[in-house]
Image (spheres, helix red, strand yellow):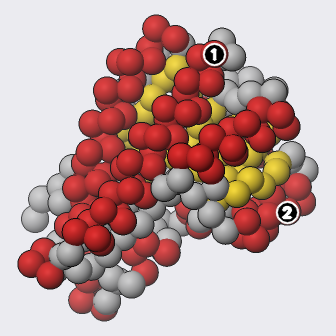
Amino acid sequence: MNTLFDLSGKTAVAIGGNSVLGAAMAKGLAAHGAKIAIVGRNLEKANEVVKEIEEMGGEAKAFQADVVSKQALEQAATDIEEWAGGWDILLNAPGKNSTTPFFDLKMDEWDDIMDVNLKGIVVTCQIFAKRMIEQKRTGSIINISSVSSTTPLSKVFTYSVSKAALNSVTQYLAREFATDGIRVNAIIPGFFPAEQNRKILSEERTTSIMNHTPMQRFGSPDELQGAAVFLASDKASSFVTGTMVRVDGGFGSMTI
């Protein structure tokens, strides 16, 4: 049992690892021994996360890439391969949101959100999973979904659609990569104080969320670490693929 969650000798690539939730999960993986590549559009923020990981005794390095750029992702993959020799864990944690009402939604905004939340992750998996297979590495891909993926939330139409599609991508790729020894799962977070949802958390909406959350509180980013470490470990979750792990304070179990 002492080694069930041991990630020593593993390398994890955290796409969007410079975000609040992405950073928390990356630090959780590092605390269990994984070497971490923090990939983000903002290199300064990525380096801040690297510094925090190093201060806790871990090993990490920052790499700059925007998920909407295939060329940038390919370059990041090459750079990470040179740095670490390959990777065993891919954490996909980029995200973009908007509160634009449905009838006011322009397709430029739709495309922008879909490019980050869905297309970007598909392209990332094409690049990083393919290299994992070429490296003959077994491992884990962890996608970050949302409670809005199963029951759409009001005011976030495009975000909800993108996350629902991501669940389908997760299950499809779980089947696609199973024979290569790569597991693909998703974490479904509830409401956390991340950048994507701060702007829609009015007093009225906060009350509504609390009324729909049995635990009657928001989640702390660190509370996603357990699920991430579990899914990353090829010992703890060796027979787990194509599943959605809820970390939502019971939000998904409520109706009225």
Disc on res. 20:
none
Q: Secondary structure at mark 2?
A: helix
Whether 23 is drawn above or below 75: the answer is below
What quarter of the picture does the N terminus occupy? top right
Disc on res. 134:
1
- Report crowding for label 1: few under 14, some 14 to 19, many 20 or more residues within 10 A (C-alpha): few
* Residue hosting label 2: 51
- Tell whether 223 sits left or right of 101: right
Given the image, on which type of amino acid does mark 2 rest?
Lys
Q: State the count of labels.
A: 2
Q: Report whether residue 208 is seen.
A: no
Residue 241 x %, y %: 42, 24
What quarter of the picture does the C terminus occupy? bottom left
Q: Secondary structure at mark 1?
A: helix
Residue ID at (81%, 27%): 85
Residue 103 x %, y %: 9, 78
